Amino acid sequence: MVFLRFFGLVLLLLVLAAGGCTSQGAPGPGGNAATGSGGVPVLPRSVERDVGPAYRDAALQAYVDGVGQRVLRRSGITTPYRFIVLDLPNANAHAVSSYVFVTRGLLAGLDDEAELAAALSHEVSHLLQRHAAQRAQQRQGVLDAAIEAAAATGSVTVGRSVAREGLLALRRYSRDQELEADRLGLALLVRAGYRGSAMANLIDKLRRQSQLEMQLMGEAPDSADRRSATSTHPAPIERQEALRSLADVSTPGESGREAYLKAVDGMSVDDSPQEGFVRGNKFLHPVMMLGFEAPRDFRLFNDQDGVLGVGRDRSLMFFSCLPDPVSGSLTEWMRNQLKPTPADIHATEIGGAEAAIGTRPRGSDAGLSQLRYVMVRRGERVCYFNLLSDGPDRDHRIDVLVNAARTFRPLSEAELTGLRPYRLRIVPTGGASATRLAQGLPYDDYKMERLLVLNGADSPASLMRQAQVKTIQP
């Protein structure tokens, strides 16, 4: 949990930070996913723990796996890979062992079967080239070289320098692997009978989504096109430029738009109910029956580990719940378990429940930042907020964040009844307008931008030239 402080060799932590590539884990005997009684893949527990659960829609699972099997079959690949949709709303695709995963969030942003095949082909290429195993070997080499340099010189600084240089080289190597997976994936895509332009379209879709995310965070959209020396992936424009030189990119083939839109119609675009829903600046959890409201300028990002809130001034709030019950008072737990021990620990009530608030002591590694810990007991469950502000208005801002934590409360029956996931719907454009479609989206801001990105359209006019479009409905 965020509360705990982790210790370890600086060099080891530096090396382990080199992850984040598309293909995860070395290819190995992962085995095929079993199929549950409802036709939904059942992942081995060890795999599900790392990647998340499979989406419980047997028809969609069968469709995606069918596209993947076509890619394998047309290229003569006999390795028994399985292609599985994960029940996650973020746009991502990755490969682990004998599995290729795509998330609901990625499917929502694609426009046809060819773009889905492009994503699957890219990931299959990672597996065929054993990219993850190669990175693991290189990472171990960096670690060994850094430790050897530190031991030989008696200087951790020298070891850290060697590790840093090795990590930069490893990240450049990861970027080369991504470009190779694009190139090889394009060949697989074309052999499967799909249009070659779908690979560039896929990259463009991911670029548009990144640009929208930048806008939502108050950043310049074009910052999505820039990468630093520590990036593990090439910038989208680099990938598109590399594809332009390949003959296969202009090869005609199938698009499969009608079949694709039929397959994703009705798909959830939210987090699963077990993870809770973000609704603007509110977080509402129908299973745990609790919620809270962040400051209005905050964006909330839900993940399996908790909910991260980011303010326009980069203030942060993190919400989660402890895995085990806490015996004794919350003030005593905070005093005994948190290191460094918070200052000004005091008991209070939030929503009529036991709560405790502590302050990160001055002089700790928090520097001049204002940091508060807030814990609340609700039945046998203890939930917490970690609150951080380090801007010029940090003293006032931290009070605002503590007040936001005080909105933590149980949900009413009426709220629980009305909580349902948002769903992707395919609607005809006839008789509608882009403005009307955008206004119907269940979001508070950037409605037209969201609609255009969802459909890969450059403008409202180009959107309305499509016979059918994707929209989001409660």
Image (spheres, rainbow, N blue to C red):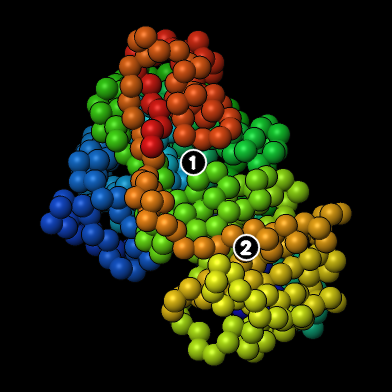
The picture places residue 277, in percent across and down from the top left corner, at 45, 51
Q: Is residue 193 above or below residue 289?
A: above
Q: Is residue 70 above or below residue 418?
A: above
Residue pointed to by mark 1: 180
Q: Secondary structure at mark 2?
A: helix
- Number of disc labels: 2
Residue type beneath disc 2: Ala
- Whichever of labels 2 and 1 marks the residue nearer the N terminus, that label is 1
Task: Give the number of the disc on residue 79.
Answer: none
The picture places residue 43, in percent across and down from the top left corner, at 27, 61
Tell me which residue sits at (65%, 46%) in the image: 296
The picture places residue 19, in percent across and down from the top left corner, at 56, 59
Tell me which residue sits at (59%, 83%) in the image: 330
Whether residue 172 can be seen here: no
Residue type beneath disc 1: Glu
Work out how far the residue at label 2 is from the one at label 1, CA to CA, in angstroms.
47 Å
- In this orientation, which residue lies closer to the viewer: 6 or 317? 317
Q: Is residue 205 above or below residue 298?
A: above
Q: Is the C terminus in the top left, top right, bottom left or bottom right quadrant?
A: top left
Whether residue 461 can be seen here: yes
Q: Residues within 10 Å of mark 1 (few under 14, many from 20)?
A: some
Residue pointed to by mark 2: 405
Tell me which residue sits at (51%, 53%) in the image: 283
Tell me which residue sits at (64%, 71%) in the image: 374
